[in-house]
Amino acid sequence: MKIFIAGASGAIGKPLTAQLVARGHEVVGTTRSPARTGSLRALGAEPVVLDALDPEAVADAVAKAAPEVIVHQLTALNTPPDFRHAKRMAAATNRLRTEGTDHLLAAARAAGVRRFVAQSNGSWMERSGARIADERGRLEPRPPADAAESVAALRHLETAVTGIDWADGIAIRYGGFYGPGTGLEDAPDATLAQLIRSRRFPVVGGGTGVWSLVHIADAAAATVACVERGRPGIYHVADDDPAPVGVWLPELARALGARPPRRFPAWLVRLLAGGGPVDLMTRAPGISSERVKRELGWTPRYPSWRTGFAEGLR
């Protein structure tokens, strides 16, 4: 198949491109940066420099590519994830999940695309008291004020993509990425790993928020399955071992050769960074990936972050 990946030079875009090419697909991949076209070409893709917020440019790029499938992996999460950059990154990503999604859907319909697969996020499932949520669950209806726009953007993306009737619309709620290219990896320039090594990624409150994680290569493999044979609707993609932040974060620090993370009281982090980070660290549920396994036969190479941290960070 001919596949158009919006955001092909990102953390999941690169392994996804490589896996699709290895399976014989023809890939056109977009990037915002001309400097990244060489790496996309080396992976076997045809690179396109594109501003996804320019509707005419998006329509032209998709029309020229004439793909059968579009995969929307656009985010702006490409700078160090500290408090100074967090609001700017979130606002830019929100636009890509709202305006960018709408531009890609319009271009896809005009080009006769048969399947549209888009990146969502499993971190903001409803805080209903359930420890693990499946695809029947909804996004949190009452998020903290500083996270409301981000959750609304995810809701917009999921509703727009799964609501189309002219193609198969699929939204993937991923768990937290780790592994090469994600910032959570054993590399000198890995941004999140640097925060953990310098003890600037703390456990907040009791660290009771449950996070589902997924190795980036496993996330890409699940996306390939959705591209090739996914059914309309929502899929969750994460490993089989959801765990509280207070459990997995110290283990990640140990795997990176760092000292244990500091522990900050929730009231202090709420004062400094807002309610969103506190909510993620203390109230988030994990997600179940049984649907993608059952329907598409996906099996993660790293079914637990415990083996993933030990073997998959390089």
Image (cartoon, grey):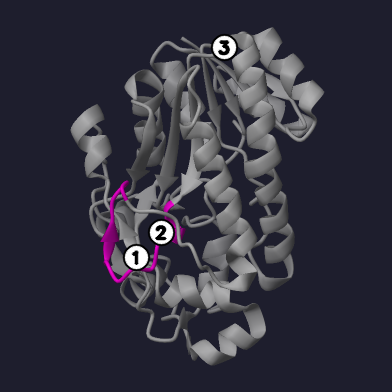
Q: Position of residue 308 (x, y in %)?
A: 31, 53
Q: Nearer the viewer, mark 2 or mark 3?
A: 2
In the image, which disc is placed on residue 125? 2
The region drawn magenta spans 122-136
User: Looking at the image, which residue is at 58% across and 84% down?
Assistant: 270
- Using the image, determine if residue 25 lies above or below residue 271: above
- Using the image, determine if residue 3 lies above or below residue 226: above
Residue at the disc numbered 3: 67
**Secondary structure mainly formed by the magenta segment:** loop
264 with respect to 93 (left or right): left
Which structural element holds mark 1? loop
* Earlier residue among tags 2 and 1: 2
User: Looking at the image, which residue is at 26% across and 51% down?
Assistant: 288
Would you identify the image quadrant in which residue 42 lies?
top right
For the question of whether residue 201 can be seen, the reply is no
In the image, which disc is placed on residue 285? 1
Residue 233: in magenta span: no
Q: Residue furthest left?
A: 294
The local crowd at label 1, few if under 14, some if 14 to 19, many if 20 or more residues have their Cα within 10 Å, is: many
